[in-house]
Image (cartoon, rainbow, N blue to C red):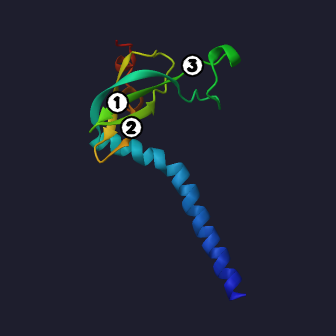
Amino acid sequence: MKNEKAKAWLFMIVLGLVIGHMFLKHPIQDRLLLKDGKSIEGIMINERGYNGKGSFLLKEENGNSIIYKYNFKMNGKLYKGDSQSSKFSPGDTIEVLYLESFPSVNRPAYYLRDDKESLKLRN
């Protein structure tokens, strides 16, 4: 009986941690990026990102906008991110915020700042 209770508690704790991680990961990363993020220029690449509709499909296939990814180089390594907007095309540049100690944690600057001015196309 004690063993079953311990297993049930352990399961609940692990489940709580997994669910907490799922819901808190991005808000925590966003807050860190706004507070300590470094700015760098990213270049839009011809690789589709998540379109917010549950797929990575082309516009022609389901009527949804195409979202492209960006990349940037840091210390000789290439990092990618999702532009979160259909307003960009491959070759455009975008301001990206990244964490210096973990560049794989990055977001478009306009996405975090809610800055419509930085959403304008630049190339």
Q: CA distance from mark 3 to mark 1?
A: 20 Å
Identify residue type, mark 2: Asn
Give the mark nearest the N terminus, 3 or 1: 3
The reply to whether residue 114 is visible in this rendering is no
State whether residue 19 is above or below residue 42.
below
Residues under numbered marks 1 and 2 in contact, where contact means CB atoms less than 8 Å apart = yes
Q: Disc 2 marks which residue?
A: 106
Q: Disc 1 marks which residue?
A: 72
| Residue depicted at x 61% and y 63% | 15
- Return the residue nearer the eye: 56 or 111: 56
| Residue depicted at x 64% and y 28% | 53
Q: Disc 3 marks which residue?
A: 66
Identify residue type, mark 1: Phe
Identify residue type, mark 3: Ile
Looking at this rendering, what residue extends furthest in the bottom direction? Answer: 2
Quadrant for residue 74, please give it.
top left
Give the percent coordinates (x, y) of residue 34.
32, 39
